[in-house]
Amino acid sequence: MPNEIIPPDIKSLTIQNPFLFAKVLEKNPTLCRQLLEQAFSLQIGELDYLGYENIFEDFSDYKDTRTDIYAHEKNTLRFFTIEMQDNPDDYFLKKMRYYRAIMDKDSYQRMNTFADLYIVFVCPFDVFKEGHHLYAIKNRCQEDPSIVYDDGCYQIFLCSDSTEDDVNSEVRAFLDYVGCGSISTDFVKELNACVQQIKSDENFQSDFKKYLATKINL
């Protein structure tokens, strides 16, 4: 039998929980769009959240419950995904490659051409232990690092457990909220209000128990 997981007190859940994080952004597309805008320094239009039912037909062995947001900016060739990463396990960094693969497949089928992909991993830890709040991953030529291979995929890690002054004030306030729960901007105040509202919702509490059950059975 699998090891028993003791369900945490839902009241004590924070935005660091991937399932709660996804539900908050799912229920609040404006907050999701604002967060993506700040992370990528982009202007982003209306987002259309996309489901995974058809995407994973070719990935029948993939058992994990989805805890990321996948969205298309309407009337553009831009697709976004954002997820809270609470477990830097052995395959953690390779997950970004996996997300890119399924986004490439799905966006091409939807648009009949290659789209620009934006992937965000929010981490309550410093991924590369270099003190940065933001790590933007780009492909470069090994022989000449000044040559950037821009294939239209933009991947970033946002890390709360960092020390450098290297992000704008809104992103820093969000990461401070992720890391220690501090509330310092209107955006974070609204985000925290949504967190508290969703945690008190009976449907969320029921869904969270089901989510824990899937984790036990993995």
Image (cartoon, rainbow, N blue to C red):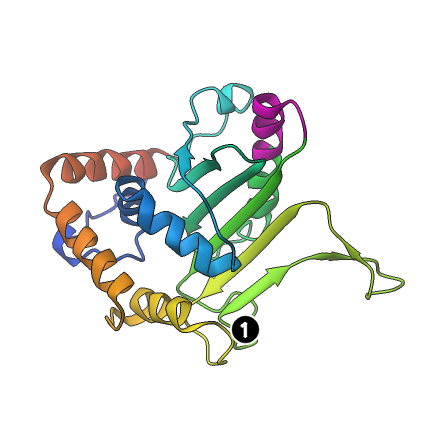
Residue type at tag 1: Lys
Query: Quadrant of the image for the N terminus?
Result: top left
Boundaries of the magenta span: 102-113
Is residue 32 or residue 52 the one in the foreground? 32
Provide residue 151's location: percent of width, then percent of height. Answer: 72, 45
The part of the image, by quadrant, that contains residue 12 is bottom left
Is residue 80 or residue 211 the one in the foreground? 80
Provide residue 67's location: percent of width, then percent of height. Answer: 37, 41
Provide residue 136's location: percent of width, then percent of height. Answer: 60, 61
The part of the image, by quadrant, that contains residue 46 is top left
Tell me which residue sits at (83%, 58%) in the image. 141
Mark 1: which secondary structure? loop
Q: Would you say residue 105 sits in the magenta stretch? A: yes
Tell me which residue sits at (27%, 37%) in the image. 211
Residue 60 visible within the image:
no
Q: Is residue 157 left or right of residue 146?
A: left
